[in-house]
Amino acid sequence: MGDDLANRVAAAMWAEDSASAGLGMRLVEVAEGMASVEMTIRDDMANGHGMAHGGFIFCLADSAFAFACNSRNQVTVAQACDIVFVAPAHRGDLLTATATERTSFGRNAVYDVTVRRGDDVIAEFRGRSRQLSGTIVEEQA
């Protein structure tokens, strides 16, 4: 499951991430500049049409984005994000969001996150990140 530093950073972040844990997310994989997170759509995540509420899909993509952009142990936050919903998800669907760094420049980077149900694309999310000062975990010698 990814490289050692990215995994240590992810573990430290996960320990404080009550939002992702509370939504039933599971960190599947993390490596430098990438992360994969999964979540099953529960009954309480359905909207008035019986489909997964878009906000929960956004949360899943945003969590994958967060783990990917912090994987190098630099405190990094979202600067801006947007999402395009491609297909509906439904109660019981297992969704996987995979975030990948596309480019970085200075303290900024752009990440693409694809949310899938199996092979079906549910949404495409783009996040722009900004590095702040500080690290998440202590560097090992």
Image (cartoon, grey):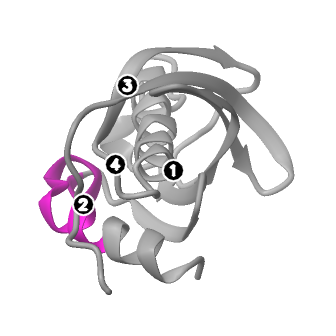
Q: CA distance from mark 3 to mark 1?
A: 11 Å
Which numbered marker is on residue 13?
Answer: 2
The amino acid type found where label 1 is placed reads Ala
Crowdedness of circle 1 by 10 Å Cα count: few (<14), some, many (20+)?
A: many
Mark 2–mark 1 contact, CB under 8 Å?
no
Mark 2–mark 4 contact, CB under 8 Å?
no
The amino acid type found where label 3 is placed reads Ala
Magenta stretch contains residue 43: no
Q: Secondary structure at mark 4?
A: loop
- The residue to which callout 3 is attached is 78
Quadrant in the picture for residue 141: bottom left
Residue found 78% across the figure and 57% down from its top: 118
Magenta stretch contains residue 20: yes
Q: CA distance from mark 2 to mark 4?
A: 12 Å
- The residue to which callout 1 is attached is 68
Magenta stretch: give its range: 11-22
Crowdedness of circle 2 by 10 Å Cα count: few (<14), some, many (20+)?
A: some
The amino acid type found where label 2 is placed reads Met
Mark 3 or mark 1, earlier in chain: 1
Crowdedness of circle 4 by 10 Å Cα count: few (<14), some, many (20+)?
A: some
- The residue to which callout 4 is attached is 74
The amino acid type found where label 4 is placed reads Gln
Mark 1 or mark 4, earlier in chain: 1
Q: Which quarter shows the N terminus?
A: bottom right
Looking at this view, is 99 or 26 the one in front?
99
Task: Please identify, in this view, whether the residue under mark 1 or under mark 4 is nearer the observer.
Answer: 4
